[in-house]
Amino acid sequence: MSTTTLLQLVQQATGELGLAVPTTVIGNTNTDVIQILRLINACGYELQRKWEWQALTTEYRFSMVFYSYTATTTDDSTTISAMSSTTGLTTNPTYFSVTGTGIAQDTYLDSVNAGASTAVLSLAATASGTAITLTFSQTRYAMPSAFDRLIDKTDWDKSKHWEMLGPETGQQWQWLKSGFISTGPRLRFRVLGDLFQVWPPSGVDDTLGFEYVSRNWAATTAGVAKASFTVDTDTCIYPDRLVVLFLKKKYFEIKGFDTTALERDYSAELDLAKANDAGSPTLSMNPRLSETLLGWGQIPDSGYGS
């Protein structure tokens, strides 16, 4: 995180451009400064999308949630009654899938009435039963508040030491949830409706985790992350020189000036910033060793298992 403030970045850029150097940015009524504020925020938004900056990359972990309660089901009815408890189900009932005798596959809770000890299912029960044990497994989880996008291949079941499979396509997701073969030893996942969704429903409290890129590229003097410059003393995670050059380029673009030289300087600085952001692996001209523990390369032509 740079310690250079919004005001200092704007003063540096305007000074290099030969413009009047402002003493304030936020609240300044000068039309040029108002435009520069919008442009420097645009720089922040665009840079956030251009690279997986290490300062914006965060690991998120959460535990799966499930409850086992008894209830009465009625054939061809979506209402279950006489629930032994509704604890944990009332805040976000639609986040929970339901499994048990007489419950159709891919059934979710639609609503819960704690006072009446009843709930409404998304699909009608297929059999009647009294005091049937049902498992309410949370398969939909809210994303972190600053979530912007996933880092691919970082989604893991930490408890089972297995990488989760996904993100699944819409077609695969519906096949898994609706087909005859819908379970397996590994969790599948999909981001849908701004929720991290897993399948199949699981009656365990495994810990899951993934890495993501935050949208909060700016910060207050107290270090509180935010998604825009809003105070003159705000700072940002990007290298100072990169922001100044990007702002100058955007200013020239909006004014219709030639940006050839500014584009060259900005592109070179962006490449340097990416290369130096978190280090790079050492590349070898030799063939890479396989990362697969067991594959066709490790299976003998004959005598397997002997």
Image (cartoon, helix red, strand yellow):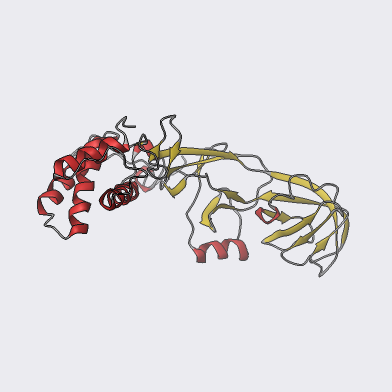
Q: Position of residue 67 (x, y in %)?
A: 74, 45
| Residue 141 percent coordinates (x, y) | 59, 49
Q: Is residue 198 above or below residue 207?
A: below
**Outermost front residue:** 29
Residue 218 location, quadrant: top left
Residue appearing at x 25%, y 51% in the figure: 32
- At which x and y percent is residue 216? 42, 42
Asked if residue 271 can be seen in this view, the reply is: no
Residue at image position (21%, 40%) is 21
Q: Quadrant of the N terminus?
A: top left
Which image quadrant is residue 79 in? bottom right
Q: Nearer the viewer, residue 294 or 138?
A: 138
Could you tell whether 297 is left or right of 84 in the image? Answer: left
Q: Position of residue 152 (x, y in %)?
A: 41, 48
The residue located at (10%, 50%) in the rendering is 261
In the displayed image of the protein, which residue is found farthest to the bottom? 76
Residue 180 relative to residue 1: left or right: right
Is residue 237 or residue 117 the one in the foreground? Answer: 237
Q: Is residue 155 visible?
A: yes
Number of labelled discs? 0
